[in-house]
Amino acid sequence: MTTDVRTRGGGPATRRSASRRSHGEAPFRFAATGAGILLLVIMAAIAVFLISEAVPALQANKGSFFTELTWEPNGSQVFGIAALAFGTVLSSAIALVIATPVAIGVALFISHYAPRRMAGPLGYLVDLLAAVPSVVYGLWGVAFLVPLLKTPSEWLNAHLGWFPLFAGEGAIGGKTMLAGGVVLAIMILPIIAAISREVFLQTPKMNEEAALALGATRWEMIRMAVLPFGRPGVVSAAMLGLGRAMGETIAVALIFPATFDITFEILTPHGNSIAANIANGFGEATPIGRGALIASGLVLFVITLLVNMAARMIINRRKEYARSGA
Amino acid sequence: MTTVQHISAGRRVKDRLAQGLVYLAFALAVVPLVSVLWLVIKNGLARFDTEFLTHSMRNIGARDAGGGAYHAIIGTLEQVLLASLIAVPIGLLTAIYLTEYGNGGRLSRAISFFVDVMTGVPSVVTGLFVLAFWILFLGMPFSGLAGALALAILMMPTVVRSAEEMLRLVPNDLREASYALGVAKWRTIVKVVLPTAFTGIVTGVMLAVARVAGETAPLLLTVFFTDSINSDPFNGPQMGLPLYVFDQAGRPNDTAIDRAWTGALTLILIVMLLNLVARLIAWWRSPAKGR
């Protein structure tokens, strides 16, 4: 980048002669700065107003908000986030376990395996997965994926039933945690793949060529040069994907059977999440019910905020590292 | 050593295996896309007729066939348009601040960081925020405008990021040439920098629009439901196409499920069309291609 000709104030060097014509400068600068500050204000306002609207409901709560399993803010006013938060974490974890390896494979395919000319369009194809609206994935999940997973679920339960995740008796398959997790995996795949691809493409050509010159096969080159270089990027990409999965609402609202319990049996019809509960419960919520949903949304906001901030910090550190000539 | 050493069988097998897995991963990623599109087209075409596109759900009983999504399509178009009118100026100005005025200071770094964090705010949370602030705190009614506010918050970070990227691509030589002619900084930005980056910014905005057009959760909490046509986004509950699909999919009758699929098809057509046009503009006037 060429150096700018600027005064210390950041304006053009011709300040004196331009002063006559630049009467629009101050308002424009003010508007630009104001817009930036407005974004910060919005972020702060989200936290402030979620808290202020949640407090009355929390005060009316007759149970313990963090440990209670049931969610009856409309009737008995006993509600707690425990089962919902557990569902959110478990379904997102399933999604992450499925999506990350596939996304790394996709990213490697686009960055190092696909023919140069094809890489762009093929990458666009994967990006299109992100363009499909959430509600359509929900429809697809209920109509196609849920029946499709029935037989494999029964097989897993029959043969690997000793493993806690695949345990369970009675009805196997149907609207399960697994189905929700798979749909979430598909939805977060594009973002993980896109960021990983960018990082893999940034691998210094020198390192790759050095590995190849030493006689490494393509896979050995990737393992020795590309993957170590890209690891922080992939980690933060996965965390961004995790944040997406936890906040995803409508697809899981259609798939999860909205139960309120804590179980690791992902093959039985159980499952709910904070976001799904908001979507399903909003219609018939009383004022206290709305406050309770806002309180649960606040928890979701805080969790995703922490995950996202951590992910961004890892990426940003990497950026400085990359710029310093690595 | 006289000959080039051969790669041992073990290493070659590993290399092939890795290649196979990478190809498999890509295939795995494309299968759901094809499956979703196929199912939506197959199930959606049944009701994709003029009645669907020109009628609302008013006076359509729970078990009746017929009815349409006209009210939802109108609602979506108005909400997305309003959201863009709010989000694009704010996003663009923020991007201008970050590239032209920020100079990497503390404020600009904070804004830049929180724009990134903001892209990760779940859509349902922006809906809850508008519910808490606009509807419960300020006492405004459920309306298309409330939905547009939630969508605008979702759009902003995307617009900022893409516009910022495009503004950074504008060569500094252009700015300096303008300064050298004695043009003030803000006029340089408006007359030189923005026109140069214009197509890129349009692409970014359209991608942002495509992203929010399919959002259901924020609408669910802010525009409420209606089966009637309401073309006034400032008064009364409105419908949105994603919300329509969600609503119909939750009903137990086959006629409703059919409408949900057709709604999904319409929605995908709109979103994909926006996406495609955006990519075409980007490709057609790509700054990297011209030079």
Image (cartoon, coloured by chain):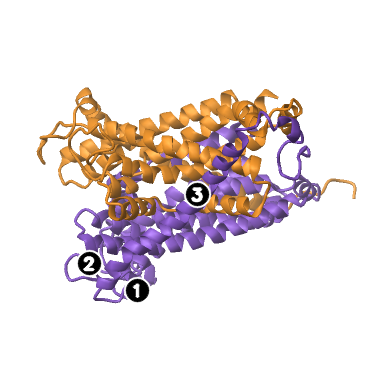
- Chain name for mark 2: A
Residue type, label 3: Leu
| Residue A22, horizontal then vertical, whole percent | 65, 32
- Chain name for mark 3: A
The residue lying furthest to the front in this view is A20
Residue type, label 2: Pro
Q: Is residue A158 left or right of residue A62?
A: right
Which residue is labeled 3 in the image?
Answer: A39
Q: Colour of chain A?
A: purple
| Residue B66, horizontal then vertical, whole percent | 15, 31
CB within 8 Å, label 2 to label 3: no
| Residue A55, horizontal then vertical, whole percent | 32, 67
Say which residue appears at 72% left-offset and 44% top-offset.
A9
C-alpha span from label 2 to label 3? 33 Å
Report crowding for label 3: few under 14, some 14 to 19, many 20 or more residues within 10 A (C-alpha).
many
Which residue is labeled 1 in the image?
Answer: A66
**Is label 2 in a helix, a strand or a loop?**
loop
C-alpha span from label 1 to label 3? 31 Å
Identify by letter the chain in orange: B
State which tag comes first along the sequence, 1 or 3. 3
Closer to the eye: label 1 or 3? 3
State which tag comes first along the sequence, 1 or 2. 1
Residue B206 visible in the snapshot: yes
**Is label 1 in a helix, a strand or a loop?**
loop
Residue type, label 1: Phe
Which residue is labeled 2 in the image?
Answer: A73
C-alpha span from label 1 to label 2? 14 Å
**Is label 3 in a helix, a strand or a loop?**
helix
- Chain name for mark 1: A
Asked if A284 appears above or below B244 in the picture, the reply is below
Front residue of this view, candidates A10 and A260: A10
State which tag comes first along the sequence, 2 or 3. 3
